Image (cartoon, helix red, strand yellow):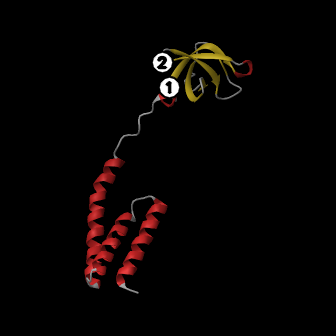
Amino acid sequence: MDPWVIWLLAAVVFAIGEIATTSFFLAPFSIGAFSAAAVSGIGGGETAAWVVFAVVTGVVFMGVRPVARRHLRQPPHTRTGTAALIGRPAIVSERIVNDEGTGTIKLDGEVWTARAYDEDRVFDAGAKVEVVEIRGATALVDGRYES
């Protein structure tokens, strides 16, 4: 089997491995192997193919590393919509009793229908609660702010 075919097969194996893992670790090896296959295909020797493989793989790694480090240092995505309300404190404005289907809270100046996250809990008006989850237009709350 010709050396360029072996390099091409190696490049394909690295590419498939990259697709399977999505870690961007095998992609530089695949690019290097494709380059080595090209060098070998145009008549370069085995040593030239190995040198091209090593150099191209190294250059791609060095080019990718700063981009990857920048992405690691990015702040977490800002939560918006109802997801931004999770973890926020609220005040019970109408007694929350899940069995009776009653209860509202004042959350960021708005009145929300509320239910206790724990089915057996009851929160009286004026209690401080924390929003645990939003289901539709109903806030599920917990008494983490209770003293």
In the figure, is residue 100 to the left or right of 76? right
Q: Is residue 124 visible?
A: no
Mark 2: secondary structure: loop
Cβ–Cβ under 8 Å for marks 2 and 1: yes
Tell which of 16 and 117 is nearer to you.
16
Tell which of 25 and 106 is nearer to you.
25
Dividing the picture into quadrants, the one containing residue 131 is top right
Mark 1: secondary structure: loop
Instruction: Decide: few, some or many residues near mark 2? Use Cα within 10 Å; few <14, some 14-19, many ≥20.
Output: few
The residue located at (65%, 14%) in the rendering is: 95
Which residue does the numbered mark 2 point to in the structure image? 108
Farthest bottom residue in view: 1
Which quadrant would the C terminus be assigned to in this image? top right
Q: Which amino acid is tagged 1? A: Arg
Q: Position of residue 97 (x, y in %)?
A: 69, 19
Farthest front residue in view: 42
Q: Position of residue 114 (x, y in %)?
A: 62, 21
Q: CA distance from mark 2 to mark 1?
A: 9 Å
Q: Is residue 39 visible?
A: yes
The residue located at (63%, 12%) in the rendering is: 94
Front: mark 2 or 1:
2
Which residue does the numbered mark 1 point to in the structure image? 88
The residue located at (57%, 30%) in the rendering is: 132
The residue located at (34%, 65%) in the rendering is: 28
Q: Position of residue 6 (x, y in %)?
A: 39, 80
Instruction: Decide: few, some or many residues near mark 1? Use Cα within 10 Å; few <14, some 14-19, many ≥20.
Output: few
Where 78 sits versus 129, above or below?
A: below
Which quadrant would the N terminus be assigned to in this image? bottom left
Whichever of callouts 2 and 1 sits on the residue coming sooner in the sequence is: 1
Query: Which mark, residue 124?
Result: none
Q: Which amino acid is tagged 2? A: Asp
Where 127 sits versus 21, above or below?
A: above
